[in-house]
Image (cartoon, rainbow, N blue to C red):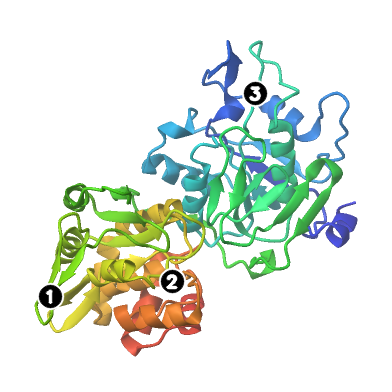
Amino acid sequence: MLSSLARNFAVAEWKEAPEAVLPRFGGTIAQLLSRDVYMGRQAPLDEQYKTLAYGAPRGFENLLTPEHVRLSVGPQPMNGDSSDASLEDLARIADTVVECRPQGPCAGILPSWGTDALQYAAATLVYRVWNPDCPIPLIGAQISARNPDLTLNPKSDAWGQVRDGLFTSLADFVGPAVVFAGRILSPVNVRKMHAWRIDAFRNVGVVPYGEVDGAALHLRLNPRATLTPRAAARGPMRSDPTPFDAKVKIFPVYPGVDPEDLAEAVRRYDGVVLVGLGGGNGPVRLETDAGGPVRYGRGSLVPPLREAAKRGVPVVLATAPQGPVDPIYENGLELLKAGLVQRGSATTANVMTSGHWIPEHCYIKLAYLLSHQRDIERVAAENGVEAEMLRHYLFVSGAKFRTRASRSAYARLTDVRPDAVDLLAGRDFGEAANAAAKSLRAGTSGHAAKEAALA
């Protein structure tokens, strides 16, 4: 049976049913519906999770059995609403995923969590799980799995989410994914698009991984998705031991935004994600006289960005609409130029593009980088490069640009030529930083850094 699945449903070849582990972190899937309010902090019992995986509500058929994959219910290090989560909680999810990997034949790890902050957990798994060697399908539910009397709710979407996540754990790829409503989504740029719909999640500007129906034993991986097969996994899987404690502010731009609020964020936070308008624009209020000096009028964001550059507080220029940042307008270009600052004999670029990444993903990646600031400074010193430029290079690695001309213009302005792949995704931070530093020192970019990181 397993061999036929491998031939027909894009799952890996197994001689015996492998084990998948489901660690629990709370969320709607584990809460009770009482008097129209979700409440309670007791997760379903172990056997109830197995019923969700292998059983089916009345009138539905489920072909998935323990003969395909054995489900073990894992630890429960936290259990609450995901809107309560901190960066420390997100790091705990990554740590638990690695800790509960089975020693024998491993299908995958399917962490269960709340949907409100699921996109932040997905991005955290991208960076804080190193060398993944199995699928990590992140699941949740929009409707509670349990009734007030503690029995399973037949109307809950948890039935589909658990079995789809479980069947996805058999797939032939490694690393995190989000499995929701029959979709296998990339953990990058995944967003909750609707507060209440069952099919709430979508990828924004990236290719989804595939589709799944665990009850029908159907799984299709998207041939356009960039996936690493199990045979190419580096292993052993580890989690980042560095505390996830950087303070990052997501700062939205809107008509009438007060530059002093941005200046306050620069003083209080380690980094800022500036969510601009359109293609990455914001108020500049450029004032010039013929032959006179350039001035910025009241309400301009340029002065606080210059202050951030002086302080070495990194700023990511992102945008709320779908599509990559592209400062083809003067306002957006001035925001990027405000980040240029002289450090000794070199000019560094402190304002960085988000490329195609949505603000939520930028928030996690910047927080991850800043949590490793000491490592960045050490690696930069060892390789004779500026720490700010190394940080910039690492952040924009993997960022996509609107056009080749946009990419070239960014390189000319910042002297950073972004790598085509995200050097930090799924890799030991020290290895990635050293590879990036060597590329900076050699004046190379493109696939050279990727090859160095994989060496």
In front: label 2 or label 1: 1
* As drawn, 110 above or below 242: above
Q: Residue at x 46, y 51 (%)?
A: 124
Residue linked to disc 3: 45
In the rendered image, which residue does mark 1 sit on?
Answer: 289
Above or below for 64 versus 176: above
Compared with residue 245, is residue 307 higher up or lower down, i.e. above or below? below
Q: Closer to the observer: label 3 or label 2?
A: 2
Q: Is residue 333 left or right of residue 12?
A: left
Q: Nearer the viewer, mark 3 or mark 1?
A: 1
Residue drawn at x 53%, y 62% as measured from the top left = 131
Mark 2 vs 1, N-terminal side: 1
Residue nearest the viewer, comparing 414 with 149 = 414
Picture coordinates of residue 201 (x, y %)?
61, 45
Rounded to the nearest angstrom, the CA distance separating label 3 from label 1 is 72 Å
Residue 151: quadrant of the picture:
top right
Q: Secondary structure at mark 2?
A: loop
Left of 40 or right of it: where is 434?
A: left
Picture coordinates of residue 421 (x, y %)? 51, 73
| Amino acid found under the numbered disc labelled 1 | Asp
* Horizontal relation, residue 141 to residue 3: left or right: left
> Please, what secondary structure does the residue beneath circle 3 have?
loop
Amino acid type, mark 3:
Leu
Q: Residue at x 22, y 51 (%)?
A: 262
Which secondary structure, mark 1?
A: loop
Q: Which residue corresponds to mark 2?
A: 397
Identify the mark nearer the N-term, 3 or 2: 3
- Measured Cα–Cα span from mark 3 to mark 2: 43 Å
